[in-house]
Amino acid sequence: MNSCSSSLYPLLEQALLCREVEVKLQLAERLFLDWRAGRLPRLAAPGPYALHEAGRPERPPLVHPAKVPRRGLSTPQGHGALLHAIAHIEFNAVNLALDAAWRFRDMPDAFVDDWLRVAAEEAGHFRLLKGRLAELDFVYGDFPAHDGLWAMTRKTDHDPLTRMALVPRVLEARGLDVTPGIQKRLAAIGDEASVAVLDIILRDEIGHVRIGNHWFCELCRQRGLEPQSTFRRLLDEYAMQLHPGEYNLAAREAAGFFADELVALARLGESSVDA
């Protein structure tokens, strides 16, 4: 049990580097079960921990975000492309969660537990979307995708506070905002099965963003930083901005955003409607 091969970090690295989709999903799910069962001791070697790229299959081809084709839902290709884009996000989210547990080795066991659970749940989300794609006669890899989520992982690999601020609180929180609109579009073409899948994903993603919020605030507390001003500073430092458009304020509140933030987001959403 105390051998290197049966400790946490080598197995996490194996899952991260795995290029076979189904094997990666199985490894992520098994890691969480074995961790919870107390079978994975944390035998951490000194850092830094270098992992530039996570394993992924040869397909889908990765292109610049602006070059990912935009298709309407009026065609089978457009329908499949939308679900494929969401599936790609969920596949990347498995790697994101595994990376958080693997990389930030000074964080407590509760942090590891949270992100291993997230990785297992993201694997489940991908399976649900993969099933829907199969029912539409598509497979993961049939459409081009982009590398935006993992690119932000690389940019935040030096600091868990920065990672928690910019990945869960920005990129993943944006998923809370756009999901209801996607569900309306799918419902309009009669795809209630995918709407139901997105209900499950939205429920779980609220919890994932809440985990990010918790650890961001905890790290701010430990470092004597005020969370909201620190968040705004990081947005400026990394040239990120909050997108105009509708915000799912109820989901963000459930995910632990501050009341002041929700008020500001409501105003931003109203200004985009007025424009």
Image: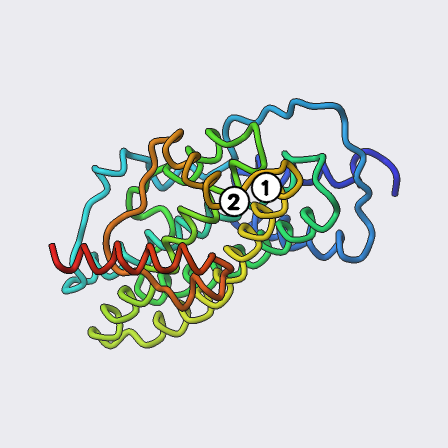
Identify the residue at horizontal 69%, vertical 23% (top origin).
47
Q: Which label's residue is closer to the chain start, 1 or 2?
A: 1
| Residue 227: percent from left, percent from top | 52, 44
As shown in the figure, which amino acid type bears the numbered disc 2?
Pro
| Residue 85: percent from left, percent from top | 33, 51
Residue sitting at the far right: 2
Residue occupied by mark 2:
227
Q: Are marks 1 and 2 in contact (CB under 8 Å)?
A: yes
Split into 4 quadrants, where in the image is the N terminus?
top right
- Choose between 209 and 102: the one closer to the eye: 209
As shown in the figure, which amino acid type bears the numbered disc 1?
Cys
Q: Residues within 10 Å of mark 2 (few under 14, many from 20)?
A: some
| Residue 112: percent from left, percent from top | 69, 47
Q: Residues within 10 Å of mark 1 (few under 14, many from 20)?
A: some
- Choose between 50 and 145: the one closer to the eye: 50
| Mark linked to residue 121 | none
Identify the residue at horizontal 46%, vertical 29% (top origin).
155
Q: Quadrant of residue 15?
A: top right
Identify the residue at horizontal 75%, vertical 41% (top origin).
8
Q: Is residue 63 above or below residue 261?
A: above
Q: Quadrant of residue 272?
A: bottom left
The answer to whether 232 appears left or right of 51 in the picture is left
Split into 4 quadrants, where in the image is the C terminus?
bottom left
Label 1, secondary structure: give it. helix
Q: Is residue 249 above or below residue 53?
A: below
Identify the residue at horizontal 31%, vertical 61% (top origin).
137
The answer to whether 105 appears left or right of 42 in the picture is left
The answer to whether 113 appears left or right of 206 in the picture is right
| Mark linked to residue 220 | 1
| Residue 48: percent from left, percent from top | 65, 22
Q: CA distance from mark 1 to mark 2?
A: 6 Å
